Amino acid sequence: MAAKVALLFFTFGLALLATVTADPDLLQDVCVADLSSGVKVNGFACKENIAPEDFFFAGLAKPGLTNNTFGSLVTAATVQKIPGLNTLGISMSRIDYAPGGLNPPHTHPRATEMVFVLQGQLDVGFITTANVLISKTIKVGETFVFPKGLVHFQKNSGQVPAAVIAAFNSQLPGTQSIGATLFAAQPPVPDHVLTKAFQVGTKEIQKIKSRFAPKK
Ligand SMILES: *[C@@H]1O[C@H](CO)[C@@H](O)[C@H](O)[C@H]1NC(C)=O
C-alpha cells in the first residue's frame, strides 16, 4: 500500500515536472532573438527591428554531407538559425543518412521529437526509463515519435541514402549524444568512473575515448 502511494506521488511529481519544463509561453506577438546581445535571459533578448529574413531559413532544402564517422548529418533549424523562433516553442531539423549511416543514441533534454521520412528507410527506436526498447522500421511518408528526454537513434539499414524532417516542441531542444557525452567530455570523465559504470578495464575505456578524440 505504502509503495503504491509512493509510486503515485512519484508519477504525479514526474507529470508536474514535465508540465513546468516545456518551453515557456510567449507574452507578445514576436520576440526575434538578438543573438549578439550580451543580455542573459531564459532564451534570447528581443531585437528592435525585425525583418522577413528573421523568420526564414533555406538550409533544409538540400541534403547535408554524410561523409563522416557516423554517416549521418543533422542540419538544425533552431532559434540559432531562425531568430524569429525565439519564445515560440518549436523548431525543426533535417537529418541525412548515408547507406548504413547512424544518428547515434542521444537525447533532447527540452523536446519531444517527431520525424517524417523524406526518402529511404530507417530503423528507429527509443528506450524508456524502464529500459524497454521501442523500435520500428519506417519508410517514406511515415512518422515516428521520440518522447522528450528519452535516449533514441535512427539507422539507415538500406542501400540508398535516407532523409527525415524532424519537428521539436522547443526553440532549442539541445542534444546530448551518449557516446560523446561520456567519452569526449572536456575535462574528461575520469576513467575510474567509466570502468566502474561499464564494468570493463581502463584499456577498453581509453580505446573508446581515443575513437572520440578529434581527428588530427
Ligand atoms: C566530404 O565531402 C566534401 C565534398 O565532397 C569534402 O569537401 C569534405 O572534405 C569531405 N569530408 C570528409 C570528412 O571526408
Image (spheres, grey):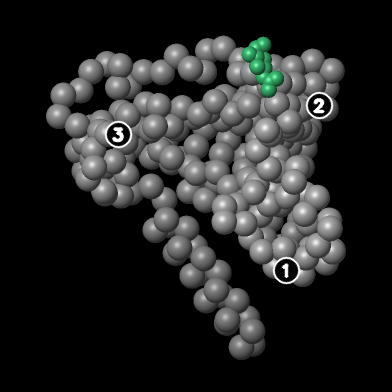
Cβ of mark 2 under 8 A from ligand 1: no
In front of the other: 39 or 62: 39
Do we see residue 163 in this rendering? no
Badge 2: residue crowd in 10 Å (few <14, some 14–19, many ≥20):
some
Question: Answer yes or no: do the residues labelled 1 and 3 have beta carbons within 8 Å?
Answer: no
In the figure, residue 68 lies in which quadrant? Answer: top right
User: Against 110, is 130 above or below?
Assistant: below
Q: Position of residue 70 (x, y in %)?
A: 73, 32
Q: Is residue 204 left or right of residue 98?
A: right
Which circle, 1 or 2, is nearer the viewer?
1
Q: Residue at x 40, y 38 (%)?
A: 171
Q: Earlier in the sequence, mark 1 or mark 3?
A: 3
Q: Specify the amino acid type for callout 2.
A: Gly
Q: Position of residue 36 (x, y in %)?
A: 27, 34
Badge 3: residue crowd in 10 Å (few <14, some 14–19, many ≥20):
some
User: Which secondary structure lies at badge 2?
Assistant: loop
The N terminus, quarter of image: bottom right
Instruction: Read off the residue under disc 1.
Output: 192
Q: Is residue 60 left or right of residue 34?
A: right
Quadrant of ligand 1 in image: top right
Q: Specify the amino acid type for callout 1.
A: His
In front of the other: 70 or 103: 70
Do we see residue 175 in this rendering? yes
C-alpha span from label 1 to label 3: 40 Å
Which circle, 2 or 3, is nearer the viewer?
3
C-alpha span from label 1 to label 2: 33 Å
Q: Earlier in the sequence, mark 2 or mark 3?
A: 3
Instruction: Read off the residue under disc 3.
Output: 35
Q: Residue at x 23, y 18 (%)?
A: 51
Q: Earlier in the sequence, mark 1 or mark 2?
A: 2
Question: Residue 100 bears which disc, if any?
Answer: 2
Q: Position of residue 197 (x, y in %)?
A: 75, 66
